[in-house]
Image (cartoon, rainbow, N blue to C red):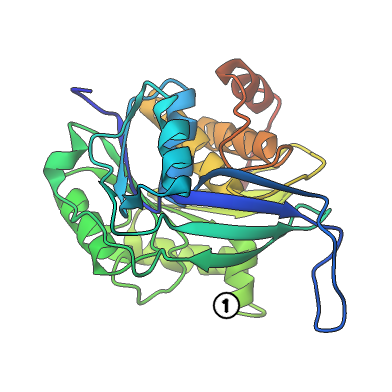
Amino acid sequence: MDVLSVFCYGEIGVDNIIQTDQLPTPELAVFPKSETYHIGGAAANTGVWLANLGIPVGLAGNCIGCDLYGEWLWGWLKVHPLLDLSQVERRKDIPTPFTRALVTPDGERSFLIFYYPQTPKLPFQTSLLKGAGFLALDLYGGHERLNAARDAYQAGVQTVIGDVIWMDHAVLPYTSIATNSASYIRSVFPGVNVRQHARQLQAISHGIVVTTDGGEEIFALDQQGNAFTVTPPKVTPVDATGAGDAFRAGMLYGLCKGLDLPRSVCLGAAAGALKVGFVGAATTLPKLSAVEGLANTLAVSASS
């Protein structure tokens, strides 16, 4: 693929989704209702969603193995012709990273994560971007993530980074668009005012800050600090795994197409809402027309 619109850098692996009525405790065994395997990792999920929406996208990050999980994953990724896999390294001497996710009937997940931290990562170089205007990045790694954000930002590429919630994080000055989860912010900073927290982040980054909050209002700040909200569609959750990745992909689709930020956030909200209705982060993928149709039903409201 000669020219890309987005490059996704970060986690690439497999998700083992285990649906269960409740979580186990030391005195209580549970009997799962189902066990399935899916594409996993924030970078892979976002990349697959973007490719499905018609955006040429590159993917790199951690290596994957040539084991059973690696064979499954490679086969799933190759289905998407707009996903450039030329920088995904496969090695026989490592296991493919994977996550076991216990999903309860409310769609919430509890994770057991294997091999991601110690798996070798492809060093980021701006030549990987192949003209991409956006770098989608997760922070679940080491210094290579900060180096990628810095190098891309300094090269004039817009960086879209998830879970940048610390005011003193070294990546914040290199963050063009932060996509954060309100529930994650509250878990780290109990009692925090999430919207005030977003404003403080924006004052440092001088970029866009978007805070999702499950089924509650999405709060967004543009580069000038102007605020607006979008109420996501009401859905019956099945599995929230990868909802943030789907949101990021929907928003990036809009931005790649030259749409304004509010419209792009509506597309992100629609993609995230459609995703939680299915098991797996990037297995059941809606058509672009479904994402756009749902986004068209959403209203944008100015906020203080």
Give amino acid for label 1. Answer: Val
The residue positioned 81% from the left and 56% from the top of the image is 32
- Residue 130 rendering spot, x and y as whole percentages: 17, 32
269 or 34, which lies in front?
Answer: 34
Whether residue 9 appears in this view of the structure is: yes
Which quarter of the rendering shows the N terminus? top left
| Quarter of image, res 276 | top right
Q: Secondary structure at mark 1?
A: helix
- The vertical placement of 134 against 42, above or below, is above
- Give left or right: position of 248 versus 84: right
- The vertical placement of 38 against 80, above or below, is below
What residue did someone put label 1 on? 188
Mark 1, Cα crowd under 10 Å, few <14 / some 14-19 / many 20+, is few
Whether residue 260 appears in this view of the structure is: no
The residue positioned 34% from the left and 69% from the top of the image is 118
- Give left or right: position of 28 versus 13: right
| Quarter of image, res 88 | top left
204 or 6, which lies in front?
Answer: 6
250 or 38, which lies in front?
Answer: 38
- Residue 101 rendering spot, x and y as whole percentages: 65, 58
The residue positioned 68% from the left and 38% from the top of the image is 273
Which quarter of the rendering shows the C terminus? bottom right
- The vertical placement of 188 against 82, above or below, is below
| Quarter of image, res 277 | top right
The residue positioned 33% from the left and 63% from the top of the image is 119
- Residue 282 rendering spot, x and y as whole percentages: 56, 37
